[in-house]
Image (spheres, rainbow, N blue to C red):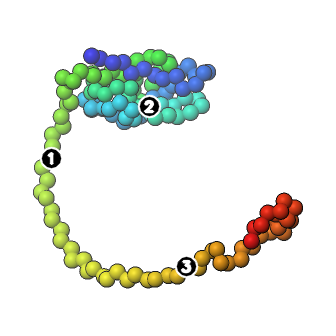
Amino acid sequence: MIVDIVMPKMGESITEGTIIEWRKKVGDAIKMDEIILEIGTDKVDSEIPSSTDGVLIEIIGKPNDVMEVGAVIARVETDSKASVIEKPVEEKEDIVVEKNIESKPVVQKKVSIKSSLTEKKFFTPVVNRIAEENNIDHG
């Protein structure tokens, strides 16, 4: 099934948008919510996610094209039978790098922590006054 990707409405008063850049090319597989292009309006620039999984089969709006809100800007093939246009894969030789890493012994240091229950706490004069007025023992 072919799904149309349309220029989204970016605000109440926005009636058109400019395509800034396509992040995907015809033949690329796309996933739902994956960023596929950037658009700009007079108020904001936004990244636009795909509304479906599939393969991008046609780009209608080119970079710098001004498109009306709701206009079809691309088409996606959503059938599970849709084939991704494969790019030739370059074979590369595996390179193995070995490094000798010296391990250093871990030193654990004991630190004593004083109990805050035995130490007298500092309270501001305002806190002391409020505590006294309300008969609160605050140490």
- Please name the residue shown 31% across and 83% down the image: 105
Q: Measuring 56% from the left and 19% from the top, which residue is drawn there?
A: 15
Q: In this view, does 42 lie above or below 68?
A: below
Q: Position of residue 41 (x, y in %)?
A: 55, 29
Secondary structure of residue under mark 3: loop
Instruction: Give the residue at x 42% y 20%.
Output: 6
Question: In the image, which is nearer the foreground, mark 1 or mark 3?
Answer: 3
Q: Please identify the quarter of the rendering in which residue 119 is found.
A: bottom right
Residue at numbered disc 1: 90
| Residue 47 vertical placement versus 54 (above, below) | below
Query: Is tag 3's residue or tag 2's residue first in the polypeptide sequence?
Result: 2
Q: Which amino acid does label 1 sit on?
A: Glu
From what the image shows, is residue 138 above or below residue 40? below
- The residue lying toward the viewer, choosing from 129 and 34, is 129
In the rendered image, residue 86, in percent from the top left (x then y), is placed at 18, 34
Q: In this view, does 99 lie to the left or right of 126?
A: left
Q: Earlier in the sequence, mark 1 or mark 3?
A: 1
Q: Which residue is drawn at 50% across and 34% down?
A: 46
Find disc 2 in the rendering and name its residue.
Answer: 48
Marks 3/2: CA–CA distance: 53 Å
Residue 17: tell me if it is visible: yes
Q: Are marks 3 and 2 in contact (CB under 8 Å)?
A: no
Callout 2 amino acid: Ile
Residue under numbered circle 3 = 113
Relative horizontal placement of residue 119, taking residue 26 as reference (left or right): right
